[in-house]
Amino acid sequence: METPPEEKIVPQFSIPKGIVGQPTYHTHPHMIPKGHLTCGITQMEYKERRDTLVNKLIAEVDNIHKNHVIVIPAARKQYMSDKIPYVFRQNSDFFYLTGCLEPSAILVLVKPAQTDTYKSVLFVHEKDAHAELWEGPRSGCSVSTQLFSVDEARPVEGFNQYLTKVTSLSKPGILWYHNDNPANLDIHDNIRSVLRHGQIALEDPQRALHQMRVIKSPAEIELMKEACYIGSQSVNMAMACTKPGISERTVDAVLEYTCRQAGAEHAAFPPVVAGGARATHIHYVANNQLLHKDEMLLVDSGCQRWMYNSDISRTWPVSGKFSKYHRILYELVLTVQKRLIELVGEQRPPLDQLFDQMCRLLGTHLQQEGILPKNIDGNDLIGRAYRLCPHHVSHYLGLDVHDAPLVRRRVPVASGMVVTVEPGLYVAPNDTSVPEEFRGIGIRVEDDVLITDGEPIVLTEACVKEIDDIEAIVGKHNL
Ligand code: GLY
Ligand code: MN
Ligand code: MN
């Protein structure tokens, strides 16, 4: 009988049927579209990323006589106390190149000198009935070869021996391995030990990898849109559930619940849910105070869905009605934030330049409102604004919240990047340089913005930020 067309197997790329170590479209059709390895991303895209990385790294050293061995470890499980694990979070670099969600796996790419091809080897945990009884199914070696479309899959136990052998056959050669903040300390010393035998130089693959990661593919952009939409709706829901007397922790729980029930794995980071003057502590995450009717609430939160993150900040009045002074400061920050989004599109500046623009804009507007003295200008004014907003205005966003950290913020933004735009103002309760009525107020407005060849697209547009819209939504949902 002939196979129906949609079931035809492309030899290089096909997803094995049956239960494996992570969701597939066969076992979790509600999570992964047909033909994708992970939601939104095909096996072919993962393979093309490996191809691109190998080519980029070779181009970096430009020496055809060198052999290349690239080692990218997965994250290992982390424990909060004996046998009690934290929620596992895969290493972003490893995930970007494999789509594999298994802890302590290792990707090795071997590119001998003067050949055009490279070999991909994925080290995974072999099938083990006893371990699987406790921890759930594993993919094992034979299935992993097909699932992750690598040339070979081998048991993790054989990694050290394999690396020693392959590097001894690869002299002179380069070991590409990220040596700082190692993803898996269990194998770090062994990886480093191959350097002792000479003729193998250590280089870092991460800069090239992060240059790739910072430009999102069309499939990644769709994933970013989804994470941003879910994050936006969760912040809207948090606004709707806000009322005097409830705890910051309740709002935190609304954010978490709303994101997860919409398909996110978990929050992108511990959220800031800061009422009143607590909002002037930029990293306040205790989230354990009660909210009062005359306060504002600052929330900075986001979600992770299929490893991609959103990052959103909004500030709203607990009572649902902005007071005169809250309104003045909020309008000021919102005006600056909207202008910065325009500037990102008009000038495509480096993010560091956007930061300078933020300080200048905040300074000018604060003077116009009589909050900063009129008799200062230039660097003095920028310095005073910086004191009131001491964090950066933007970072790249993607698989990590502070994404692709090896890409400098001195490079102009480019199409395919997603960046945050997040000015704020934080006036400490004891800041006597600012009129009394503005003290003890913290405000941040943060959106996630896709850079395109045309206008920038605000991916978190669904999250309300206009004063009228905020006042219409706060307190409208009964928990
Ligand atoms: N939530 C972290 C940040 O906004 O960068
Ligand atoms: Mn944030
Ligand atoms: Mn941010």
Image (spheres, rainbow, N blue to C red):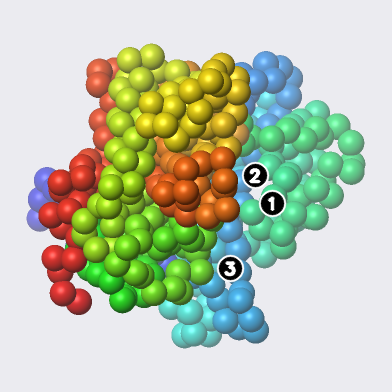
Measure how far apart labels 2 and 1 are at the Cα level. 11 Å
Which amino acid is tagged 2?
Answer: Val
Q: Earlier in the sequence, mark 2 or mark 1?
A: 2
Answer with left or right where residue 454 lies relative to residue 65: left
**Residue type (three-letter) at the residue carrying disc 1:** Pro
On residue 71, the disc is 2
User: Mark 3: which amino acid?
Assistant: Lys
Quarter of the image where the C terminus is located: bottom left
Exactly how many numbered labels are in the figure?
3
Can you identify the residue that label 1 sits on? 182
In which quadrant is the N terminus drawn? bottom left
The image shows residue 33, relative to residue 79, as above or below, that is above
| SS at circle 3 | loop
Q: Relative to the observer, which residue lies in front, 405 or 223?
A: 405
Q: What is the C-alpha distance between the residues marked 3 and 2?
A: 19 Å
Q: Which residue is mark 3?
A: 77
Q: Judge by depth and name the residue closer to the eye, 61 or 442.
A: 442
Asked if residue 75 can be seen in this view, the reply is yes
Given contact means CB atoms under 8 Å apart, are the residues at marks 3 and 2 in contact? no
Q: Residue at x 38, y 55 (%)?
A: 298
Mark 3 and mark 1 in contact? Answer it, CB < 8 Å.
Answer: no
Going 47% across and 54% down the picture, which residue do you hit?
440
Image check: 445 left or right of 35?
right
In percent of width and height, residue 124 lies at 55, 61
